[in-house]
Amino acid sequence: MKVVVLAVVFVSVISVSFTADLQCTHKKVDVPEEWLSMVDPCVKKMQDQIQEEMRAAIQYMAMGAHFSRDVINRPGFAKFFFDAASEERQHSIKLISYLLMRGNLTENVSTLLQKRIEPATEVWDSGISALRDALRLEAKVTNKIRDVIKVCEDPQLAENNFNDYHLVDYLTGEFLEEQYKGQRELAGYISTLDKMVGEHGILGEFLFDKQLLG
């Protein structure tokens, strides 16, 4: 028994020793910083927008979970909101990737994930109330993106009068157009569902749910 214990201790010591030897440490790399052109206020706004996109994703997940409940059972609404959550999460990943490409998140990526995010609402009394909340949420995200653009194209923010044309173009073409299309889609859904419920009552929501399910 003693031999077995000694063997285990020996193997443990050897393992710790090898682990310590195998740990990879690097000296600070001397990389020129002339290529880092984003100004601090713009970087801060982008980091805030990443949080905003993640907040929207959590809210949509709450919506999807609500309509997935057995006592609600609206699979079409659930699918629509879960898909929206995935889309918002992808937006946050795109913004993180952009900052990494510009060299502005080389050491502090984890700080973007440390803030606790909770949904503002978890229960809805109808499908149309959830769609209205979704449209308000999208409008809020859109306005936040526009705020980022305003800050990042303001030449007064940097000593060299730097205007971040590339980032502004990226946000305008990649994000704003998608936001506007999404808002129009939600507005159309609200209009259609309101008419269907007005004509057919709760059956109208049931039929609209089937339409969302495709």
Image (cartoon, rainbow, N blue to C red):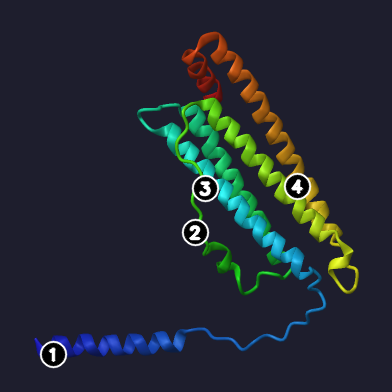
* The N terminus: image quadrant: bottom left
Residue 3 - label: 1
**Going by the image, does 4 lie left or right of 145?**
left
Camera-near label (1 vs 3) is: 3
Say what secondary structure mark 4 lies in: helix
Residue type at mark 2 is: Arg
Report the label total.
Answer: 4
Decide: few, some or many residues near mark 2? Use Cα within 10 Å; few <14, some 14-19, many ≥20: few
- Farthest residue toward the left? 1
Q: x, y percentage for residue 182? A: 68, 35
Camera-near label (1 vs 4) is: 4
Q: x, y percentage for residue 178? A: 72, 40
Residues at marks 4 and 3, CA–CA distance in whole angstroms: 22 Å
Q: Quadrant of residue 36?
A: bottom right
Residues at marks 1 and 3, CA–CA distance in whole angstroms: 55 Å
**Going from the N terminus, do you reach mark 3 or mark 2 first?**
3
Q: Is residue 4 above or below residue 134?
A: below
Decide: few, some or many residues near mark 1? Use Cα within 10 Å; few <14, some 14-19, many ≥20: few
Say what secondary structure mark 3 lies in: helix
Q: Is residue 193 above or below residue 46?
A: above
Residue type at mark 3 is: Ile
Residue 174 - label: 4
**Going by the image, does 185 lie left or right of 114?**
right
Residue 58 - label: 3
Q: Is residue 3 above or below residue 97?
A: below
Q: Quadrant of residue 83?
A: top right
Could you tell me if the residues under marks 4 and 3 are in contact, i.e. CB atoms within 8 Å? no
Could you tell me if the residues under marks 3 and 2 are in contact, i.e. CB atoms within 8 Å? no
Say what secondary structure mark 1 lies in: helix
Could you tell me if the residues under marks 1 and 2 are in contact, i.e. CB atoms within 8 Å? no
Residue 116 - label: 2
**Going by the image, does 116 lie left or right of 192?**
left
